[in-house]
Image (cartoon, grey):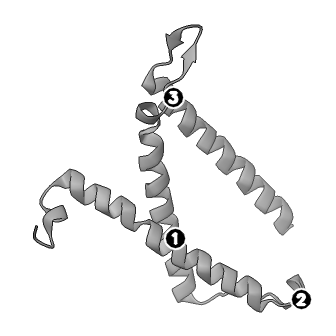
Amino acid sequence: MPANWWTRNRRYFLYTVREFTALPMALWLLWLLYDIKSAGSGAANFQPPRSAAFVAFSAVCFLFATYHSYTFLKLAGVIMHVKVLDKTVPPRAIVLTMFGLWAVASIVIGAVLIGFAR
């Protein structure tokens, strides 16, 4: 197979991009762990990176994480089979539930982070 086999079909390309999204997110998490370790004994020593490069890298990682989550949750109806009273829940209902839970979790986490920032 040629090295660019995945660029010839749109589905293969999107699948490969989705799998690639894990790499920048892993690098961002390693950077965060390094910063936490360098803080030493406590939060008073921790200074978060404020460079434009880090902010841009964080924004790119956020976009990759959002794309990765979206594509995974879109498949929830295919992956999960739920039976309620001997009837199978429609895949569309499962997908909508997953996206709703994602939105609720995002709102709760955002509220907690804003609350701790005050």
Residue highlighted by disc 3: 94
Q: Could you tell me the amino acid type at mark 1?
A: Met
* Direction from residue 13 to residue 108 in the image, left or right: right
SS category of the residue bearing label 3: helix
Residue highlighted by disc 2: 41
Count of numbered circles in the view = 3
User: Mark 3 vs mark 2: which is more N-terminal?
Assistant: 2
Q: In the figure, 90 relative to 100: above or below?
A: above
SS category of the residue bearing label 2: loop
Q: In the figure, 89 relative to 78: above or below?
A: above
Q: Could you tell me the amino acid type at mark 2?
A: Ser
Q: Residue at x 75, y 91 (%)?
A: 38
Q: Are the two marked residues, 3 and 1, in contact with CB atoms closer than 8 angstroms?
A: no
Q: Position of residue 40 (x, y in %)?
A: 83, 90
Q: Position of residue 42 (x, y in %)?
A: 89, 85
User: Callout 3: 10 Å neighbours few (<14), some, many (20+)?
Assistant: many
